[in-house]
Image (cartoon, rainbow, N blue to C red):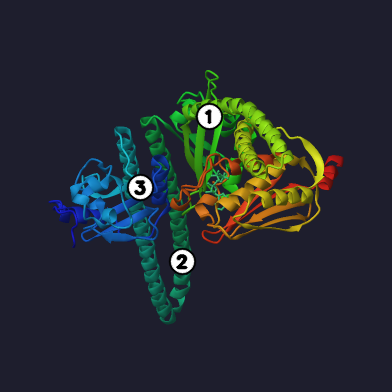
Amino acid sequence: MDNTFGKNIIPDNDELRIEALKRYKILDTPPENAFDNVAKLATQIFDVPVSLISLVDAEQVYFKANVGMGNVKSTSRGVSLCSLSILDKNVTVFENAPTEPCLLTNPNVAGSFGLRFYAGAPLTTADGFRIGTLCIIDKTPRTFDEKSRFILESLAKIVMDEIELRLSSIEEAGKQHTISESAEAVNEELKATNDELFFSQRMVEELNEELSTTNEEITAANEELIALNHSLKVSQRSLYLSNAKLAESEEIKNLAIDQAELGIWYIDADTREFVSSPRLKDFFGYEASETMAYDAALNHIREDYRSIVGAKVEEAIASGEAYDLEYPIISKKDNRLRWVRATGKLNPADNGRRSYFSGTIMDITERKEDDQRKNGFISIVSHELKTPLTSMSGYIQVLQLRATKNGDDFSSGVLGRALLQVRKMGSLIDGFLNMKRAETRKIPLDVTVFDMAELVKESEVESMATISSHNVIFAPVERTIVKADRDKIGQVITNLINNAVKYSPRGTTINVACVTIETNAVISVKDQGIGIAAQDLKKLFERFYRVNRKDIETVSGFGIGLYLCEEIVQAHSGKIWVESELGKGSTFFFSIPTESSITKLEES
Ligand code: ADP
């Protein structure tokens, strides 16, 4: 075995330790939900990309759960950091791996994976053997405080309990198997006896009748035995399951009591039975000993968010997609308002266990208040900037008029460009002002009836004057009458075209189209640019979200353009979406209902 650490990584009791590990019959077995869930929970709690449950064998380290490292199932013991981690009964932490002399030549650290942060808590058996670890990994250095160590240790304990539970279920299954086997053996014997009896029957006719009756009785008794055995098996299984569920919710509870910031919840996907940790109850103003039903919890969500949260939970249960939402709750105890972030995921039914939806709730009040202060500041500054900018634009126009009159083409041209820059600045400031309004859901709409094609043609004229780097083609542009805020929809179109310019190479083509599809006006902007990776697609429309890529670091922007586009389109009961693949260009679409469909709806 190659050892890259430059020190002995084999503990004195390694032979006994491996014997203990083998006892669990878990080495090199396929993934199981119970373990995957803990690893996923660890990535959620610590906000890291990778979490592993590793089992350290003599030569190899096997991964029982692997979140974030692709399909890797095992690695050599001599390179795995988990081999170091089992040497210590406490959590092993490398906050910045390259500064650790023993990791300098480690391929995970020095190689292309670029491991920087590692924390591993040993999985310790009841008799004190450290058979593996629950570890978390990141590619950037980070600090890891006492509380985090404690949480990681608690999660490792859950994993160890799960391994024990798993073993006892295997042993139970084994016992059941033996019982069935001996029942079968008895059965075989009975059959043989039966045969013998049959044989004797020939010889002793009178005896036969009696024996045959006895024989039937025995067969009936035997069948009963088999049936009994079967129902025993079934009740045994459900006993084991309810035990497992009990242990699981007990562990969840304990974990949440011990650490102060995460509330944990669990919803039965069929019955909506709701189990919550004491910390979560505390958020909602309930005592730990009080029961809090699902509907009661919903009632403490601030009214404007209540139905949204309810609908999102139902949607996540139905679709199986991850759930991530921020909303305000009002405490039952003292009416205190608190912002929380709730994340969760559906755990499909597995091995007879019912399907459940579970996750965490975190207090984000401080961050929200910070945000609100920041936004308040942005909004004041934007208001203050707006007035002088408007005057400036007026003065420049006066100067430009005069220059044109005097035949001074040079000044007039320069002033034209100055005006363009002032307008750009104006629309940036408008963006900030709109952001404030969008946040309070108060985007004011100035609705008129107009032809979308006309608006798109105006964008064409504007783009001819302002875009020389790309070939922008407007076709097809079909007449579609809509009832909407003309300026705001214009802003959306301009924004999408400007993004297409920003995120695609010079000289490429941008296609803008406006068509009617059923009862909607659909606008699309297609570019031949850098495209968008699948994991970014969903987040693009979030406020301040910008894709993190080296090649576009210098492209200016605040990550609010698409957020505002979505708010504006949604205020029109419309939809905005994107189709894209990395390196293959992007097409942004948005649709809003046509005027005739709105009128029809109003009439009915
Ligand atoms: P920004 O001001 O950063 O452009 P947006 O909200 O308009 O903000 O866009 C958010 C992010 O979405 C951008 O930072 C960029 O990474 C990505 N993006 C937007 N449009 C495109 C596009 N046409 N092609 C590729 N990436 C895009």
> Gap in Å between the C-alphas at discs 1 and 2?
54 Å
Residue toward you, 266 or 417: 417
Which quadrant: the N terminus? bottom left
> Gap in Å between the C-alphas at discs 2 and 3?
42 Å
Report helix, strand or loop for mark 3: helix
Q: Quadrant of residue 402?
A: top right
Q: Is residue 383 above or below residue 135?
A: above
Residue toward you, 433 or 242: 433
Task: Residue under label 2, please give it.
Answer: 219
Q: Earlier in the sequence, mark 1 or mark 2?
A: 2
Query: Where is residue 50 drawn, in percent x and y?
Result: 37, 50
**Residue 242 left/right relative to 300:** left
Mark 3 closeness class: few <14, some 14–19, many ≥20 residues within 10 Å: some
Task: Residue under label 1, please give it.
Answer: 292
Task: Residue under label 3, please give it.
Answer: 162
Query: Where is residue 295 drawn, in percent x and y?
Result: 60, 32
Q: Which-is-in-front pick, marks 1 and 2?
A: 1
Amino acid bearing label 2: Thr
Query: Where is residue 324 drawn, in percent x and y?
Result: 53, 41
